[in-house]
Image (tube, grey):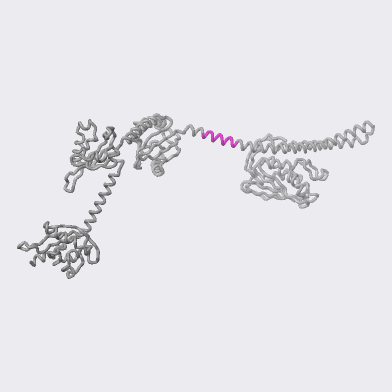
């Protein structure tokens, strides 16, 4: 007896002993652990005291009676713990008898199967969801077969695909969907046998609908086994591929047309590369442009067309990298033909992906632009040439316009100044004629002398006009003249005037410096300006200073004097031809010297101006090569 009690108290399951009315007489420690109640609390309590609804004794009384009549009963229900928490309990009741057969109570075992129950509920819910899912699928016919191939379930997709309702098809053999040829060859049975042997049978083929029409189907037949690895049936999934098969055929046909089209294109090299850059196709245009036959190039890496320096620089791999990252790579550059010659190519490399967005390769389109590029270069060169000509024409037109303006002004001034001595000569000739007619010859010598002076004046004017017109004629020489030597030459030419007037002249020595330009004209420029400085002094000793500076290639010169000066109104017009500010008897000259200076400076791309005040001398400034050195051959004349 003690050993039996020890055994009960060592069990992990809750074990109780009940009297004939179901009251607790004994409980082992596992019962106390399961429920949380104390031993003293449970003794003499009815069994339904442990149920979640501990006031309901009818259920417990029913189970006790069933145990007596059946010999044992197991049932499941919610039980409670001492803290009120519930758990799902599996209770087993078995009646106990005396040796004489009298009923003396019950043995009771209680197990906590809450976790197992949750798993069962989750499984049922999952199975229910799967059933509803399968039954609701309309694009696929999904149904179950028993081990012999008879249909045991049916879904909405099966009804829409084949036209059978579940009441019409359940219980029928699945061979009902096969055509006569497949039935004669015992194809349904072969499919079941294959699925039994290898676990699954899969194919595409023709199947028959309820109305007798056929459709192209994808079929997956899977063998189903229970926990004991016993075949319990098959699952069968069928999809209608008729439209998809038609689309595939259309795609194949389209691809074939495209392939034939691409292969016949001759103006473009169109070919495919695999994902590593190896050539896998070749068209007629590629053969014509690059010179390779298909068997010579397929399988080779596409860098075969690149110059050596670009291969060394890793350019082919870089182009594929860019195409992978952004979808496309495009450029123009040199490529190499089979014979080693170069051609200028427009290249487009496009990454090609399959339906799963996996890279399967690249398409490459190359066009030979060599001739077009040459034509563009010629057009560009011509365009630049025409622009240069246009710029030169603008300069020439501006120069012609300026020359025409000068010519108009010059013509007006010359016509006026030349007429003055001519009128003088004419007047004195008229007087001479009148005196001869009257016999008065005593004044004729005086008139002849004055006529001669007027004629000499006209000769001087004509000489100055010729000098002025010569400035713009012929080629402008670009001599590099040492400054010191150049000024020494000028002073030597003017030595007579300088000595006669006791002129003091100074200039900064520029050892190693040069003045660029036409030597004859530059000497005429300096000599005219220095001669004016000597002339316009009003009897004072002439003091002249010459300065020079060079900034950014522009030569700037200034010649200052202590002469009579001039007002601001005069400075704006003294460079006009025949422009005189003073009477000839006071300051002789034709008024052409400064006009010639201006012409010389302008021919050397410079400017000339004067700063002066009456009585305070003048400073003549001029620049050379302000707009750069430009040597012109000119036949302009005034």
Q: Find residue 440 and report its image quarter.
A: top right
- Give the dominant element type of the magenta stretch: helix, strand or loop: helix
- Quarter of the picture containing the C terminus is top right
Relative to 378, 439 lies left or right: right
Q: Which residues are magenta?
A: 376-388
Q: Is 216 inside the magenta-drawn segment?
A: no
The quadrant of the rendering that contains the N terminus is: bottom left
Using the rendered image of the protein, determine whether residue 312 is visible from the camera's viewpoint: no
Which residue is farthest left? 100
| Residue 381, magenta (yes or no) | yes
Q: Residue furthest right?
A: 439
Question: Residue at point 83% right, 44% down?
Answer: 585
Left or right, residue 360 beside residue 196: right
Please name whichever residue, 475 or 99, is drawn nearer the observer in this view of the structure. 99
Residue at 86% over, 34% down: 426
Q: Quadrant of residue 428?
A: top right
Q: Nearer the viewer, residue 185 or 22?
A: 22
| Left or right, 382 with reference to 460 | left
Q: Is residue 111 above or below residue 125?
A: below
Where's residue 447, x and y in %? Answer: 89, 36
Q: Quadrant of residue 356?
A: top left
Residue 145: tell me if it is visible.
yes
Q: Is residue 2 above or below residue 311?
A: below
- Residue 234, image x, y percentages: 21, 42
């Amino acid at each position: 007896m003690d050993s039996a009690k020890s055994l009960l108290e060592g069990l992990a399951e809750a074990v109780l002993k009940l009297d004939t009315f179901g009251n607790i007489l004994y409980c082992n420690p596992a019962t106390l652990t399961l429920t949380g109640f104390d031993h003293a609390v449970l003794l003499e309590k009815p069994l339904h005291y442990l149920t979640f609804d501990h006031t309901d004794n009818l259920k417990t009384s029913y189970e006790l009676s069933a145990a007596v009549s059946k010999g044992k009963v197991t049932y499941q229900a919610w039980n409670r713990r001492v803290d009120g928490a519930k758990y799902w309990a599996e209770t087993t009741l078995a009646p106990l008898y005396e040796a004489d057969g009298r009923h003396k109570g019950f043995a009771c075992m209680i197990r906590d199967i809450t976790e197992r129950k949750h798993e069962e509920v989750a499984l049922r819910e999952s199975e229910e969801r799967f059933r509803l899912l399968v039954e609701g699928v309309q694009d696929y016919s999904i149904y179950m077969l028993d081990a012999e191939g008879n249909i045991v379930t049916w879904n909405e997709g099966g009804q829409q695909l084949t036209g059978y309702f579940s009441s019409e098809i359940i219980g029928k053999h699945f061979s009902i969907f096969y055509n006569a040829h497949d039935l004669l060859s015992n194809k349904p049975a072969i499919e079941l046998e294959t699925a039994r042997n290898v676990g699954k049978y899969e194919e595409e083929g023709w199947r028959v609908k309820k109305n007798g029409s056929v459709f192209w189907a994808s079929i997956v037949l899977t063998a189903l086994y229970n926990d004991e690895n016993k075949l319990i049936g098959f699952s069968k999934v069928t999809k209608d591929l008729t439209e998809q098969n038609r689309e595939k055929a259309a795609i194949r046909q389209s691809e074939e047309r495209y392939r034939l089209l691409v292969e016949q294109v001759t103006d473009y090299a169109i070919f495919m590369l695999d994902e590593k850059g190896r050539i896998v196709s070749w068209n007629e245009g590629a053969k014509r442009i690059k010179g390779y036959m298909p068997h010579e190039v397929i399988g080779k890496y596409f860098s075969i067309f690149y110059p050596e320096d670009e291969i060394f620089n890793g350019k082919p791999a870089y182009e594929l990298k860019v195409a992978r990252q952004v979808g496309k790579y495009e450029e123009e550059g040199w490529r190499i033909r089979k014979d080693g010659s170069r051609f200028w190519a427009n290249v487009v490399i496009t990454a090609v992906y399959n339906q799963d967005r996996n890279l399967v390769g690249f398409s490459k389109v190359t066009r030979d632009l060599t001739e077009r590029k040459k034509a563009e270069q010629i057009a560009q060169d011509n365009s630049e040439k025409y622009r240069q000509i246009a710029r030169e024409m603008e300069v020439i037109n501006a120069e012609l316009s300026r020359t025409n303006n000068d010519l108009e002004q010059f013509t007006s001034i010359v016509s006026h100044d030349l007429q003055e001595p001519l009128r003088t000569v004419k007047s004195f000739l008229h007087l001479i004629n009148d005196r001869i007619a009257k016999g008065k010859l005593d004044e004729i010598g005086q008139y002849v002398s004055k006529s001669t002076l007027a004629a000499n004046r006209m000769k001087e004017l004509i000489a100055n006009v010729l000098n002025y017109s010569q400035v713009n004629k012929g080629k402008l020489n670009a001599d590099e003249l040492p400054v010191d030597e150049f000024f020494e030459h000028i002073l030597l030419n003017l030595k007579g005037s300088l000595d006669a007037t006791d002129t003091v002249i100074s200039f900064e020595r520029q050892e190693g410096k040069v003045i660029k330009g036409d030597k004859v004209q530059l000497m005429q420029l300096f000599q005219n300006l220095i001669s004016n400085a000597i002339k316009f002094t009003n009897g004072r000793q002439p003091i002249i200073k010459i300065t020079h500076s060079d900034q950014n290639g522009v030569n700037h010169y200034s010649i200052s004097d202590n002469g009579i000066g001039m007002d601001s109104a005069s400075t704006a017009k003294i460079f006009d031809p025949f422009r005189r500010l003073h009477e000839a008897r006071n300051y002789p000259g034709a008024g052409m010297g400064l006009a010639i200076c201006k012409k010389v400076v302008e021919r050397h791309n410079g400017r000339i101006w004067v700063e002066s005040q009456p009585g305070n001398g003048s400073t003549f400034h001029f620049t050379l090569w302000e707009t750069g050195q430009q040597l012109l051959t000119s036949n302009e004349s005034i």
